[in-house]
Image (tube, rainbow, N blue to C red):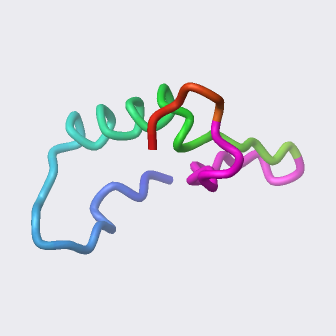
Amino acid sequence: MLREGTDYGEREYSLEQKVAHVRAQLERGQARILFDPETNTVTLELVPIAGRRSGAQP
């Protein structure tokens, strides 16, 4: 199930822009991908500042 279109905010972003934002957060260590094998689902989660990789910028 794709949740694209459930954003709330003043500015609309294209799917390509959203993907770029998420990829950048993953590369900076600001977000991570979690997989639950019991439900076979994937979740994107923001990483608390204390848990980010060293060298990653906030």
Above or below for 8 versus 15: below
Viewer-closest of 10 and 36: 10
Residue appearing at x 33%, y 36% in the figure: 19
Relative image position of residue 26 (x, y in whole percent):
51, 33
Count of numbered labels shown in the rendering? 0
Residue appearing at x 27%, y 62% in the figure: 5
Viewer-closest of 43 and 45: 45
Snapshot quadrant of residue 24: top left
Q: Split into 4 quadrants, where in the image is the C terminus?
A: top left
Relative image position of residue 23 (x, y in whole percent):
41, 30
Asked whether, in this view, residue 29 is left or right of residue 51, the answer is left
Above or below for 22 versus 2: above
Question: Is-magenta flag for residue 28?
Answer: no
Question: Is-magenta flag for residue 48?
Answer: yes
Residue occupying the far left of the picture: 11
Residue occupying the far front of the picture: 55
Asked whether, in this view, residue 36 is left or right of residue 17, the answer is right
Residue appearing at x 29%, y 67% in the figure: 7
Relative image position of residue 37 (x, y in whole percent):
86, 43
Residue appearing at x 50%, y 53% in the figure: 1
Magenta residues (range): 38-52
Snapshot quadrant of residue 34: top right
Relative image position of residue 47 (x, y in whole percent):
62, 50
Residue occupying the far right of the picture: 38
